[in-house]
Image (cartoon, rainbow, N blue to C red):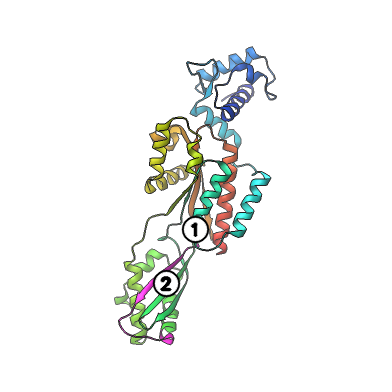
């Protein structure tokens, strides 16, 4: 455990390096308002911090830079998300007061909002449809042999399925089928509703209503459920944060792999972290990167996750605040439907 003086010096080094990306010398740290000791004392303490693994000294410079251990100490000392700035808070309020329409567009726009707040690459993982609960279902007759099923999910998503019928029908029969279908599947998860065997059900309805119900359940059961949707914004902002072309190309390659991105964020959350630094991400290609992530909650249930990816010399306080605020507002907006 670091004593208060060394902790203050380490915070000063990390803060300065995040701002400048240049190795930090003892003289500069000693001139900091928070550090009230001589340059010689700072120099000795920085040497001790290097020996303990918190700082490293590039061979080309007399200054020092933080290691992953140094960044981890710095982040843990922050104690979690702080307050978002006034202008950024207004930007978030304005965005969510105006965002409407399809959920996919909202999530895509949210990734761009988060990137504009942090200037890092932003990731929004959409809700898992299979675990979403069906809040309501409607059937709409489009033509005598075509019915549209509209499902509203607890995740905020709206699914639409076309149902082709073998015989003509009318609105009375469609309405009766809608009432029965709502009784059958409302409150169930999509996975449960999709697995209902319509042939084993005693539908207890007229033949015409039963036919629509069987056709609707067949469509739900046979519909291909896509994996989590991933929306990424601000890759150009992220690119500007790195000097090495190879690092940038590796990061872009990873961001193109949807399953890898989802697993990355889920793994960080599963380990109880909100920040993964360098090799803590579990991906060697991201050794020079950090991830800040938070879940968003819809109707009391975790629906998905959002995060930012940037360099290890990230402005962690700003990133934590932005991710926390946007996650909260996104969950509230989706819950309100």
State whether residue 277 appears in this view.
no
Q: Earlier in the sequence, mark 1 or mark 2?
A: 1
Judging depth in this view, the residue of 128 and 286 nearest the camera is 286
Query: Percent position (x, y) of residue 299?
Result: 53, 61
Residue beneath disc 1: 105
Task: Find out whether residue 172 is within the magenta segment.
Answer: yes
Q: Nearer the viewer, mark 1 or mark 2?
A: 1
274 left or right, relative to 193: right
User: x, y percentage for residue 25?
Assistant: 59, 18
Q: Is residue 44 visible?
A: yes
Disc 2 secondary structure class: helix
Which residue corresponds to mark 2? 185
Looking at the picture, how far across and down is residue 252, in whole percent? 41, 40
Question: Could you tell me which residue is drawn at 58 percent across and 52 percent down?
Answer: 328
Q: Residues within 10 Å of mark 1 (few under 14, many from 20)?
A: few
Label 1 secondary element: helix
Label 2 Cα neighbours within 10 Å, binned few <14 / some 14-19 / many ≥20: many
Chain part drawn in magenta: 156-173
Residue under the point 49% across and 58% down: 105
Q: Quadrant of residue 45?
A: top right
At 55% across and 30% down in the image, what residue appears? 73
Q: CA distance from mark 1 to mark 2?
A: 27 Å
Give the answer, above or below, for where 134 lies relative to 274. below
Which of the 4 quarters of the picture holds residue 284?
Answer: top left
């Amino acid at each position: 455990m670091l004593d208060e003086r060394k902790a203050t010096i380490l915070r000063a080094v990390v803060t300065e390096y995040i701002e400048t990306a240049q190795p930090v010398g003892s003289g500069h740290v000693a001139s900091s308002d928070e550090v009230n000791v001589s340059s010689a004392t700072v120099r000795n303490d920085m040497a001790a911090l290097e020996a303990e693994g918190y700082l490293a000294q590039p061979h080309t410079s007399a200054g020092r830079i933080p290691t992953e251990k140094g960044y981890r100490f710095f982040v843990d000392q922050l104690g979690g998300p702080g307050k978002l700035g006034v202008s950024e808070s207004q930007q978030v309020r304005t965005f969510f007061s105006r965002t409407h329409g399809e959920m996919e567009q909202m999530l895509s726009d949210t990734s761009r909002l988060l990137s504009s707040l942090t200037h890092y690459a932003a990731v929004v993982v959409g809700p898992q449809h299979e675990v979403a609960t069906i809040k309501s279902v409607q059937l709409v007759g489009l033509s005598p042999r075509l019915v549209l099923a509209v499902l509203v999910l607890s995740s905020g998503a709206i699914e639409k399925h076309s149902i082709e019928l073998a015989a003509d029908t009318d609105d009375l029969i469609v309405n009766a089928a809608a009432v029965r279908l709502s009784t059958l599947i409302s409150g169930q998860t999509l996975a449960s509703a999709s697995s209902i065997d319509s042939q084993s059900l005693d539908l207890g309805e007229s033949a015409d209503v039963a036919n629509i119900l069987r056709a609707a359940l067949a469509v739900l059961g046979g519909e291909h459920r896509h994996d989590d949707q991933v929306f990424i914004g601000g890759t150009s902002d992220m690119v500007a944060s790195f000097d090495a072309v190879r690092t940038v190309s590796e990061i872009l390659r990873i961001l193109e792999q949807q399953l890898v991105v989802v697993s990355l964020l889920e793994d960080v959350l599963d380990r109880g972290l909100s920040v993964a630094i360098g090799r803590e991400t579990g991906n060697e290609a991201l050794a020079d990167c950090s991830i800040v992530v938070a879940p968003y909650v819809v109707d009391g249930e975790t629906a998905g996750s959002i995060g930012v990816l940037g360099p290890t010399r990230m402005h962690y306080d700003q990133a934590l605040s932005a991710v926390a605020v946007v996650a909260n507002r996104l969950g509230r907006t989706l819950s309100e439907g």
